[in-house]
């Protein structure tokens, strides 16, 4: 593969080659909050990271989505089998998977987030929210065309979910301020790569503005 010429930035090179075309927001959004469970949001746990600013940003997205009746889907990772047999190769690769046993605190959504009974909880085993789950059906039944993606980690489950959203025909909108990682370099590179090939990396401000354009749902409807 041809490399960027000396003195040119990666961004310039990719732009010259036609990468990073804007998808734009669609007409029917849903908010996906990837793996903001305590095992990931507690920096003292093996899989955890400091995600305080991301939680604040996600709370703003949640408020806007709840106010406008936009579907909200949280995901968590949970393993039920003895010796993590249902974690497969994923469990073999990461010792921290042991903190994701079903029924433990680690798989619970961080209490700082406004997770309501009207929101959906998607339980998964692997990185992508699409792999081995019914997420596509949940989105299609609501005629969703735009998936607003937040959560963690940018280089892992967020990236995998955004790639699969693109491959499945949804518009992935990754909110820059609302995604986080254990590694800043992995975070930055993943956002660059996602924006170049698979998704729009958008700001919190423009996403909130987009959500504000929708009419609020009738009481009792999610």
Image: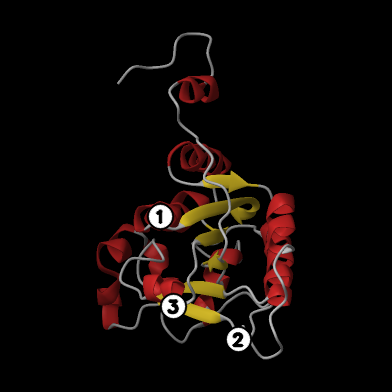
Residue found 72% across the figure and 62% down from its top = 213
In the rendered structure, which disc, 1 or 3, sits on the residue that comes first in sequence? Answer: 3
In this rendering, would 46 be left or right of 212?
left
The residue where tag 3 is placed is 141
Quarter of the picture containing the C terminus is: bottom right
Q: Name the foreground residue: 99 vs 137.
A: 137
> Where, by quadrant of the figure, is residue 185 drawn?
top right
Q: Name the foreground residue: 37 vs 209.
A: 209
Q: Could you tell me residue 174's position as x and y percent?
A: 56, 52
Q: Could you tell me residue 214's position as x and y percent?
A: 69, 67
Residue found 25% across the figure and 62% down from its top = 89
The residue where tag 1 is placed is 160
Q: CA distance from mark 3 to mark 2?
A: 16 Å
Residue found 66% across the figure and 77% down from its top = 69
Q: Which mark is residue 118?
A: 2
Q: Secondary structure at mark 1?
A: helix
In this rendering, would 2 be left or right of 145?
left
């Amino acid at each position: 593969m041809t490399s960027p010429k000396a003195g040119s930035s990666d961004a310039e090179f990719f732009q010259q080659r036609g990468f990073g075309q804007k998808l734009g927001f669609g007409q029917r959004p849903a908010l996906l909050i990837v793996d903001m469970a305590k095992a990931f949001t507690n920096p003292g746990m093996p899989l955890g990271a400091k995600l305080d600013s991301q939680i604040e940003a996600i709370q703003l997205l949640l408020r806007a989505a709840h106010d406008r009746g936009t579907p909200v889907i949280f995901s968590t990772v949970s393993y039920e089998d003895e010796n993590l047999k249902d974690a497969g190769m994923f469990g073999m690769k990461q010792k921290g998977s042991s903190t994701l046993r079903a029924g433990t605190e680690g798989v619970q959504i961080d209490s700082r987030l406004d997770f309501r009974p009207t929101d959906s909880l998607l339980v998964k085993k692997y990185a992508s929210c699409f792999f081995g789950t019914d997420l596509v059906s949940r989105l299609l039944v609501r005629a969703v065309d735009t998936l607003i993606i937040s959560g963690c980690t940018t280089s892992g489950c967020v990236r995998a979910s955004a790639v699969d959203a693109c491959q499945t025909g949804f518009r992935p909108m990754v909110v820059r301020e609302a995604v986080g990682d254990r590694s800043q370099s992995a975070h930055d590179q993943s956002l660059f790569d996602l924006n170049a090939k698979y998704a729009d990396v958008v700001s919190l401000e423009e996403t909130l503005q987009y959500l504000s354009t929708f009419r609020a749902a009738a009481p009792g409807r999610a």
